Amino acid sequence: MHPLSNFFSESDRRYLNVDELKSLGGYSQSLPQRLKIYRQIRDQELALLQPVADKLELQCVGESTAALERSLKLAIAVLRASAMAMLINDMSSLDDTLRWVEQSQKSYSSQATDQQCFNLLAQQLQRSLQPNQFQLLAPYLKPFQQLPAAIA
């Protein structure tokens, strides 16, 4: 359950303590910036991903077109899931996407190409976003960049 949901689900039993109020206040203060980043990613998705696709094609010369397309589709899903997780400030919302990416990598033996694609995506986002914006998003991209290079 999302941490904010916990606050609301217990609202009839107790008031929030000092730490919970700080957490809620911090999230509330960062929400306008999170919304701005989310909208920017949503509105510029194609412009963000085209350079990633171009570089991936150059760096993975031996890969089939189908394999590159699969990696790019995963990158799109990773970008969207990471943007939403950043917006709602909930790392656990990435769990299903992480499992799905891992399963896809096992099925297609695409770990190396996918890692290259995810790293290119992070680099492109770092170039396209303001440093403080990328700093908010980066923790939600990191789990995908750190997937094992070879999943057992």
Image (cartoon, rainbow, N blue to C red):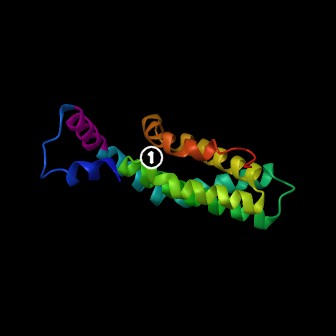
Q: Secondary structure at mark 1?
A: helix
Please say if 124 is above or below 103.
above
Q: Nearer the viewer, residue 66 or 4?
A: 4
Q: Is residue 95 magenta?
A: no
For the stretch drawn in magenta, the main secondary structure is helix
Residue 18 seen in the figure: yes
Residue 124 image point, x, y percent: 60, 45
Identity of the residue furthest to the right in this view: 62
Q: Residue at x 63, y 41 (%)?
A: 146
Residue 20 image point, x, y percent: 23, 37
Q: Nearer the viewer, residue 6 or 74?
A: 6
Query: Start and end of the magenta stretch?
Result: 19-30
Q: Mark 1: few, some, or many residues within 10 Å (few <14, many ≥20)?
A: some
Residue 53 image point, x, y percent: 69, 56
Total numbered labels: 1
Image quadrant of residue 126? Answer: top right
Q: Nearer the viewer, residue 150 or 110?
A: 150
Q: Residue at x 45, y 46 (%)?
A: 91
Q: Which residue lies under the disc numbered 1?
A: 91
Quadrant position of the N terminus in the picture: bottom left
Identity of the residue furthest to the bottom in this view: 66
Q: Residue at x 72, y 55 (%)?
A: 54
Q: Is residue 59 left or right of residue 7?
A: right
Q: Nearer the viewer, residue 80 or 18?
A: 18
Q: Residue at x 66, y 59 (%)?
A: 103
Identity of the residue furthest to the front in this view: 13
Q: Is residue 37 left or right of residue 71?
A: left
Residue 47 seen in the figure: no
Amino acid beneath label 1: Met
